[in-house]
Image: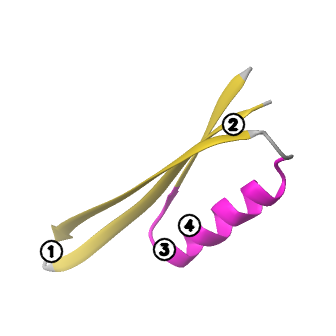
Amino acid sequence: MYKVKVFDKEHEKDLEAAVNDFLSRLKDGQLIDVKYSVAAMESEGEQIYCFSAMIIYRT
C-alpha cells in the first residue's frame, strides 16, 4: 500500500526538521519520492513564503 504525507511550514528550517524527522522513522525501501515546493506572495507590503513537501512512501 502507498501513502502520502504532506508538510507545510512558513520557514524552510521548520520544513527541513519535520521532513528529516519523518524520514528517520521510515524503514529501508519505504521511501518512493519527495516533492518540494515554495510559494511566495505579498500581503500588506510583506513578503510571505510557504515551504511544502510531499513524501510518497510504502507501508
Asked if marks 3 and 1 touch (Cβ < 8 Å), the reply is no
Q: Amino acid at mark 4?
A: Leu
- Give the image location of residue 49, x and y in percent: 32, 69
The residue singled out by tag 1 in the image is: 44
**What label does residue 22 carry, if any?**
none
Mark 3 or mark 1: whose residue is earlier in sequence? 3
Identify the amino acid type marked 3: Glu
Q: CA distance from mark 4 to mark 1?
A: 25 Å
Crowding at dot 3, Cα within 10 Å, few <14 / some 14-19 / many 20+, comes out as: some
Give the crowd class for mark 1: few <14, some 14-19, many >=20 residues within 10 Å. few
In the structure shown, which secondary structural element does the residue marked by tag 1 occupy?
A: loop
Q: Which residues are magenta?
A: 8-26
Q: CA distance from mark 3 to mark 2?
A: 22 Å
Identified by mark 2, the residue type is Tyr
Mark nearest the camera among 3 and 2 is 2
**Mark 2 highlights which residue?**
57
Q: Which mark is residue 12?
A: 3
